[in-house]
Image: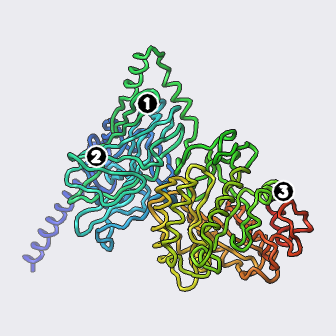
Amino acid sequence: MREMNEQKYSRNMALSFLAGIALGAVIVLVLLWALGYISCGEGGQAAETGADFALSGTGAESPSENRETIQEPGGSVESSQETSWGTESEPMQETSGETESEPTQETSGETESEPAQETSGDMESEPMWNPSSKPGTGTASEPADNGQSGPQENGEDGQGAVSLVFQLNGSWSGEEGCYYQYTAVIENNSDQKITDWEITVRDFDGCRVDSYWCCGTEEKDGLLVITPADYNAEIRECAKAEGIGLIILAKEDWELTEASLEAETAGGRLTVVFGGESDTENDRDAGQEAAGQEVPDQEGADRDMTDREPQSQGNRGPDIQAGGSLGGHALAGDTPVGSHGRLRVESGSLVDQEGTPCQLHGVSTHGLAWFPEYVSRESFRTFRNEWDADVIRLAMYSDEYGGYSNGGDQEKLKELIDNGVEYASELGMYVIIDWHVLGEGDPNIHREDAIAFFDEMSGKYAEYGNVLYEICNEPNGAVSWKDVKEYAQEVIPVIRANDPYGIILVGTPQWSQLIGEAAADPIEDYDNIMYTLHFYAATHKDELRGNLEQALKDGVPVFVSECSICDASGGGAADLESALAWVDLLDRYDVSYVAWAVSNKNETAALISSGCGKLSDWSDSELSDTGRWFKEQFTK
C-alpha cells in the first residue's frame, strides 16, 4: 500500500514539473512577441515585401500604406501608387482578399464592356478565379494583380497624361490549357489626340489568342501585338478607348506582366511602358527642339488636364459640324443634327457627339408603298418645326402586298427611301431606314434581299452620319431570339463594311417585345447596336414596362422605334393613363421613341385625321386625337 502511494506521489510530481515547463515556454513566447521579436502576416502567414509587388518600381512599400484606389468604368482599378502585387504568386488561385466593399458593377457596349466570349475550353469546369471579386483589393499575402497601369508622362502624384490599364476579368481551365480573359483601357488625359496606337505584350511564348474584340491581334516572335479596330484608332483629348478585350490560352500558368503602348501624337512618337517609365517626353521634346520650337511646361499642362474628367470613347466617327455639309446639304446649327452631331452608343445609352445622353422623338411613315405622298420635304418640315421632331422613320414593308420582297416595285421603293433621306438631311434631321418585317414573321425568309438592300443603302449613306439602320421591324410567330440573332449576324457585317459608325437597330421576338432575351444573349463584336422595343399602350402595360426598365438597369441599349396610345391592332380606344406611364419611363431613362404612323388612315394610330387630305402644316383640328397627343408630348 505504501509502495503504491509512493508511486502515485512520484507521478504527480513529474506531471507538475512538465506543466511548469510548458507554462514557462508560453510565457517566454508571449514576452518575445510583445517585444517585437516575433511577427505574423495576415492569416498566420509571414508578411511578404520586396519583389512580390515591385512591378512599377515602388520597391518594398507596404500595400497597406496609402493605397487609395479609383474605380474606373468597366471595373478596372488604378492605384495612386501605381503598384500591383502578386507577381510571384500562383495566378490561377481564387482571390480571397476583403470583399466587403460594394461589388463591381456590370458594364455594357462595345466597347465599353466585357463581352461574354465563347471559347473552345471546357467552360463547365470550376472557375479558378472569382470574376466577381473586386479587382485590386487583395493584400500582399493574398494577391490581386488584375488592375495594372503604366503612365506616359508623370504629373502630380505620378499620374500620367496617357495611361494603359489591363484588367484580368477571369480565368478558367479547359481541355487545352488555361484561359485568361483580359480587357484593356487606353486613357488619353492629355491635350492632344493620339492615333495609330499599338500595344505589344511580351513573354507570349507558349500562348495563343483564343478570341478578341474591339481590336486586331498578331502573334510573332514570342510577342503579341494588339492593333486598333477602325473606329478606335484615334483617341481624342480627354477620352478613352475601352472595351478592348481578348481571351488568351496558355498551356500552363501565365499572367500579363510586360506590355508597351506606342502611338502617334502631334508632338512626337508616344511610348508608354507597362510597369516602367515612359520615354515619350524625351521623344517629344527632342522633336520640338529639332524644329526650333519652345518645349512647353508639360508638368503644368498635366496638372490642368488631370482636372478634366475623361469620357468613354465609344465608337465615335468623324464629327458633324454645324455650318458644314450633311449629305451635300448645308447643315444649320438650329437643327437636330446641327445641335447633336453624330450619335453613338455608350454605356448602354444613345449619346450625342459630345457624349451627352440624347433622346430622340419622331414619327414613322406608314408603309411606303401605301402612303408614299407623306414622304415629302414639307411634311418633314412640319414635323420638325411644329412638333419638335428629331427623327423620321421610313417604314418599308418587306413582305406584305407591295412589299420589297413580295411583288413590290423595288426601284420605286428605293427611290422613296432616297427621297426621304435627302429631305431629312436637308432639314438637319435624323432618319431611320426600316426593313419592316411583319407578315413573314421570320426575318431569315428574305435575308438575302435584306443583305443586298442594306449593302446598297449603307454604301450610299455611310458618309452622311444621320442615318440609322433598322434591320428587322417586328419578328413574330415561332421566331426565337436565336433566329433573329443569326439573321442580324449576317446583315450587320455588311453594313459595317460600308458604315463603321451608323446606329443599327435590331428587332426582338414577339413583335419587338422580348427585350429580355436580347439582354441575356446580346450581339457581340460590334459597337453602336441597339435593341428595339415596341408598345401599344392599351395592350402593353406594367409587365412590359417592367421588362424594359430591368433591361435598361442591366445596361441594354434600347430604342423604341414604334409606339402608339391605342391597342396593338392600331385601332381601339386610346389608354392615356398607360401611355403617360410609358412616356414617363422613357423620359426618365432618355429612351428615344417614334410614333406610328404618318397617314390619314381611318384607325386610331393614324396621326392625321381621316378627313384631312393635307400633306403638311396641319392645324390641331386636322390631326387625330393620337396626333395631338404625341405633338403635345414632343413639345412639352
Left-right relation of 582 to 409: right
In this orientation, which residue lies closer to the viewer: 563 or 223? 563
Going from N to C along the chain, the mark reached first, 2 or 3, is 2
Residue type at mark 3 is Glu
Residue 360 % position (x, y): 70, 58
User: Taking 285 as reference, is 259 above or below it?
Assistant: below
Residue under the image location 54 percent in, 47 percent down:
317
Q: What's the residue type where badge 1 is placed?
A: Asn
Q: Mark 2 points at which residue?
A: 48
Labels 2 and 1 touching (C-beta < 8 A): no
Residue 269 visible (yes or no): yes
SS at mark 3? helix
Residue 168 or 353: which is nearer the viewer?
A: 353
Check the image and report above or below for 539 versus 374.
below
Q: Position of residue 437 (x, y in %)?
A: 59, 75
Report the residue at 74% width, 48% height from top. 335
State the residue position of label 1: 154
Q: Dot 3: within a 10 Å radius of its alpha carbon, few (fewer than 14), some, or many (20 or more) residues?
A: some
Q: Distance between the residues labelled 2 and 1?
A: 28 Å
Cα separation between marks 3 and 1: 54 Å
Q: What residue type is labelled 2?
A: Glu
Report whether 414 appears left or right of 74.
right
Q: Which residue lies furthest to the left in this view?
A: 3
Give the residue at x 57% y 71%: 472
The quarter of the picture where the C terminus appears is: bottom right
